[in-house]
Image (cartoon, rainbow, N blue to C red):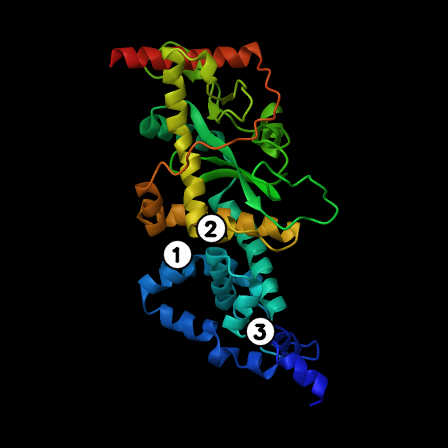
Amino acid sequence: MDEDLLVLLDSPILRWEVLNTRDGVHEINKNRGITGEVFNLYQELRLYPTKFFEYTRMPLSTFDYILSKISPKITKEDTNFRKSIRPEEKLFITLRFLSTGTAFRALAYSFCMGKSTIASIVHETCRVLWTELVPIHMPIPTEQRLKAIAEDFEATWNFPHCIGAIDGKHCEIKKPPKSGSAHWCYKKRNSIVMQAVADAKRKFVAVEVGGRGKQSDGGTFIASTLYKLIEKNKYKIPMPKRLPNSDVIAPYVLVGDEAYPLKHYLMRPYPERVLNNERKCFNIRLSTARQTIECAFGILTCKWRILLKPIETNRQNALSIIKAACILHNVIMDLNGDLDLDVQRVLANSPLYENHQRNCGVNNNPSRRAKNVRIKFTNYFWEQYQRM
């Protein structure tokens, strides 16, 4: 071996790069089935359900269910030159990345694979998780589904005719090339916005990822597919009906915070400066219903800690990673619900979020129709309160 190469190998990082050359797979990585975490831990942790949960953030039964749904799409055939990575290994690696946010280089050391191999596995698996699981666990809601959501909000949160709580979450990313300040958000970092609607049980009804960090939540909503569907009457919102124990006919609505525009289908709180007792009562009811989306985000980030760190990939792969975390959230809520340990931990510590600065840059000039809808709910809640 020449002296230049010996000098390179004195550096651990450069040594890793040299060992993983384009000429083929280094002997260290050929032994991943013997020495890597995939072979050792996956087989061993299956024998210890508690440890398996700690490592993957999901029960073994949920892992096996997901694997059965995505395995055909991530299975590759062995070649004469190398053995393919099994689908269970791919899912195992991806869950470890999502649950810890560990860098690809560090995972490469752990799993005795090349950094590019780890990255390829994670990106492929995240895309497949979304495409294969969304039709089952986050389908476009039907009118009957939205009515069921409204019944749950009434029974659990005392807000009738609510078809979901909406909010946005900033996910930090590496600045995309030639993007200027488009992704620079009020938190003083580059981000993309995930807008989500949650039902009364903290499950996502709809998720849209891709808004630029510079946009306000309201601006992100106005630019979203959801907004366009509602405005064109293509989102299956049920027809208005009487509020419970009342003759007042009111529409079905989403609930959002002060960053969102007031619409006849979207309620936001009254500003502090105009509050009286009736309006305070309305704000309390709305805030209570909105806890579902706050809790959903709390559960999401508690379990998938990649969302608490900068996502060091290109923008397109970052979108896939965020969407994969969201659909995994729904799978776990469907299969395990409040029995999930991370869900229990979050609920035990609610409320999760302190008051914080919001980017409320959207110009909100509500229509008379929107104002009248809010007045209907305000009067209804106040009358209910006085009867207590």
Q: Indicate the position of residue 276 as horizontal and vertical percent values.
A: 39, 10
Q: Residues within 10 Å of mark 1 (few under 14, many from 20)?
A: many
Of pointers 1 and 2, the one earlier in the residue sequence:
1
Q: Name the residue under label 3.
A: 84
29 or 49: which is nearer to us?
29
Give the Cα distance between marks 3 and 1.
25 Å
* Residue shown at 46% from the left, 20% from the top: 269
Q: Indicate the position of residue 285 as horizontal and vertical percent values.
A: 37, 22
Label 1 sits on a secondary structure element that is loop
Q: Name the residue under label 1.
A: 58
Q: Which residue lies furthest to the right in this view?
A: 178
Disc 1 residue type? Met
Is residue 238 visible in the rendered image? The answer is yes
Of pointers 3 and 2, the one earlier in the residue sequence:
3
225 or 216: which is nearer to us?
216
Report whether 348 appears left or right of 170: left
Label 2 sits on a secondary structure element that is helix
Report whether 354 appears left or right of 235: left
Is residue 160 visible in the rendered image? The answer is no
